[in-house]
């Protein structure tokens, strides 16, 4: 973040070790951003700071630009989450709603970023960029996801633009992970048609030595789940053929892929597409349950 961007920060949190505990030593926020930092979440023996990021009015208005910086000192653990989905309201003209996050994660530290999904209203334009600067022994859990919109209002992939960029850099600005998701209305094929009935897309990144056991379990679970879906139910060539063929052709409610990245596969990325928001919540709750011992509370519980 350059000097001009730093001067425009709407939020900043610094976490350091104080008497052996992860502690917020600096917290600043201004409209439209607000932080809620509970005194304690989970058992007292667990050393983790929980931070809830909120916006006044429950969403991001057209033209809003929110810029936040996190500094997590060596040996600290922090969780950044939300209390509900991030709503992006309708765009006024060509104005774009923007969110920027820069996080510096110290040695032997962990940042767990587990927000609820972004929900863009009809015609909304939204851009999000998140930059993470890590050490070789830093740990990061990143969940980034979006729903198709307000189903109760009949809006499905009805926004104009959604762009989310996530970059991870090692010391010395060495690129470790560079990713951008771009969803934009096309002049020929509408976005809703391209998404083929899937209502949620999500990405999960798990990086660092403290997460190895969870990474292995997630990789095995995704591998098994997709193998079962690809194989489908065996078709018997008898009078059951019609119903079995119909079952085989059904669209999976959730599909996922998993791959490794970084030095010696130190990180994994999971990509998800789902027919329902609830199924993604259940997937995340199950796959990230192993974090409870580190955070005091299981994510998305």
Image (cartoon, rainbow, N blue to C red):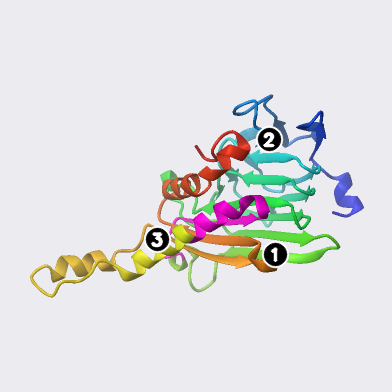
User: For residue 225, which numbered disc appears in the image?
Assistant: 3
| Distance of label 3 from label 1 (alpha carbons) | 25 Å
Magenta segment boundaries in residue numbering: 195-219
| Residue 49, x across and y down, in percent | 70, 34
Residue 214 within the magenta-colored segment of the rendering = yes
Q: Is residue 27 visible?
A: no
Would you say 155 lies left or right of 51 here?
left
Q: Nearer the viewer, residue 222 or 83?
A: 222
Q: Nearer the viewer, residue 212 or 94?
A: 212
- Determine whether 241 is above or below 62 in the image: below
Quadrant in which residue 15 is drawn? top right
| Distance of label 2 from label 1 (alpha carbons) | 25 Å
User: For residue 4, which numbered disc appears in the image?
Assistant: none
Mark found first going from the N terminus, 3 or 1: 1
- Secondary structure, mark 1, is strand
Q: Which residue is mark 2?
A: 48
Would you say 131 lies left or right of 4 here?
left
Does the residue at mark 2 contact the one at mark 1 (Cβ under 8 Å)?
Answer: no
Quadrant in which residue 267 is drawn? bottom right
- Determine whether 231 is above or below 279 in the image: below
Residue 30 within the magenta-colored segment of the rendering = no
Q: Which residue is mark 1?
A: 177
Tell me the residue at 70%/46% (across/down). Answer: 110
Tell me the residue at 56%/52% (across/down). Answer: 213
| Residue 33, x across and y down, in percent | 72, 37
């Amino acid at each position: 973040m350059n000097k001009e961007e730093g001067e425009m920060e709407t939020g900043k949190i610094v976490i350091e070790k104080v008497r052996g505990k992860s502690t917020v030593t600096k917290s600043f926020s201004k409209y439209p951003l607000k932080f809620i930092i509970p005194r304690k979440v989970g058992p007292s023996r667990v050393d983790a700071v929980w931070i809830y990021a909120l916006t006044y009015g429950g969403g991001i208005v057209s033209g809003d630009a929110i810029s936040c910086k996190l500094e997590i000192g060596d040996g600290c653990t922090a969780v950044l989450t939300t209390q509900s989905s991030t709503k992006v309201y309708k765009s006024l003209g060509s104005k774009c709603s923007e969110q920027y996050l820069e996080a510096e994660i110290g040695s032997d530290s962990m940042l767990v970023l587990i927000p609820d999904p972004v929900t863009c209203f009809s015609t909304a334009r939204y851009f999000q960029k998140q930059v993470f600067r890590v050490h070789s022994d830093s740990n990061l859990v990143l969940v980034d996801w979006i729903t198709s919109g307000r189903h109760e209002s009949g809006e499905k992939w009805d926004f104009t633009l959604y762009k989310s960029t996530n970059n991870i850099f090692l010391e010395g600005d060495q690129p470790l992970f560079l990713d951008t998701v771009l969803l934009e209305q096309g002049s020929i094929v509408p976005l809703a048609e391209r998404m083929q009935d899937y209502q949620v897309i999500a990405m999960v990144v798990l990086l660092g030595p403290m997460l190895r056991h969870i990474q292995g379990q997630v990789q095995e679970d995704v591998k098994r789940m997709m193998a079962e879906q690809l194989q489908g139910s065996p078709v018997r060539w008898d009078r059951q053929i019609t119903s079995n063929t119909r079952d085989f052709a059904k669209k999976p409610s959730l599909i996922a892929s998993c791959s490794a990245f970084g030095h010696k596969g130190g990180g994994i990325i999971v990509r998800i597409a789902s027919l329902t928001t609830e199924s993604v919540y259940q997937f995340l709750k199950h796959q990230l349950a192993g974090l409870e011992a580190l955070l005091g509370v299981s994510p998305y519980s």
